[in-house]
Structures are given as structure tokens and as C-alpha cells.
Image (cartoon, grey):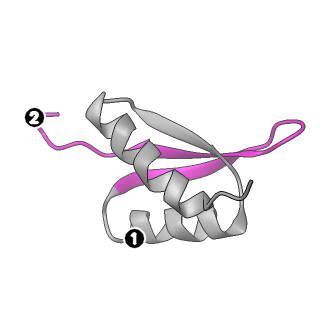
């Protein structure tokens, strides 16, 4: 079965924001890193980083909230 990684990433971010998580992790890919950079540049997230783990590396997005959460 094929799934769309971007279509999976965006709802994960939305769900993490709804429950006020400080960060959200995804399996890493170049496309997701590029999307994370755009989200950071446009001011939707604080930052992103890669977590080198075995057997799969992960991408961590640090979520951004307003003054009232």
C-alpha cells in the first residue's frame, strides 16, 4: 500500500498543535526537510532538526504557539 508522506505530515502537525505538544517527530526524508524549512521561514514553527537513530532517522519540528498558548 502506498501512502503520501506529505499528506501524513500535515495532519500530524495539526493534531500535535491541538493537544499542545512542544514538538512532533516524523520519519526523515529530503522532501519533509524542505517542507520543514519552508514552515520555519514562514514563521509557522520555531525550528526543526534531524535525530540520527537506527534504523531510521527522524525529523523533529519544534512547534510555535502564541502568548496564550
- The residue drawn where x is 61% and y is 63% is 33
The mark that comes first in sequence, 2 or 1, is 1
Question: In the image, residue 31 lies at what x, y percent?
Answer: 64, 69
Marks 2 and 1, how far apart in space? 22 Å
Q: Residue at x 40, y 32 (%)?
A: 22
Q: Magenta segment range?
A: 45-69
- Helix, strand or loop under label 1: helix
Tell me if residue 35 comes above or below residue 55 in the rendering.
Answer: below
Quarter holding the C terminus? top left
Q: Let me know if residue 59 is in the magenta part.
A: yes
Q: Is the residue marked by circle 2 packed among few (<14), some (14-19), or many (20+) residues within 10 Å?
A: few
The answer to whether residue 43 is left or right of residue 38 is left
Residue under label 2: 68
Give me the residue at 44% from left, 55% from top.
10
- Left or right: residue 1 versus residue 46 is right
- Asked if residue 26 is positioned above or below residue 2 in the image, the reply reads above
Counting from the top left corner in percent of width and height, residue 63 is at: 38, 44
Circle 2: element type: loop
Specify whether 49 is left or right of 13. Answer: right
Query: Residue 25, how many percent across, how many down?
Result: 58, 40
Q: Residue at the location (39% across, 51% down)?
A: 46
Rendered view: 25 above or below 33: above
Q: Which mark is residue 41?
A: 1
Depth order, front residue of 64/14:
14
- The 10 Å Cα crowd at callout 1, few under 14, some 14 to 19, many 20 or more, is few
24 relative to 54 in the view: left or right: left
Amino acid at each position: 500500500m502506498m501512502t503520501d508522506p506529505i499528506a501524513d505530515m500535515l495532519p500530524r502537525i495539526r493534531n500535535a498543535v491541538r493537544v499542545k505538544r512542544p514538538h512532533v517527530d516524523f520519519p526523515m526524508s529530503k522532501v519533509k526537510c524542505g517542507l520543514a524549512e519552508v514552515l520555519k521561514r514562514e514563521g509557522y514553527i520555531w525550528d526543526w532538526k534531524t535525530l540520527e537513530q537506527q534504523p531510521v532517522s527522524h525529523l523533529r519540528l519544534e512547534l510555535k504557539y502564541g502568548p496564550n498558548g
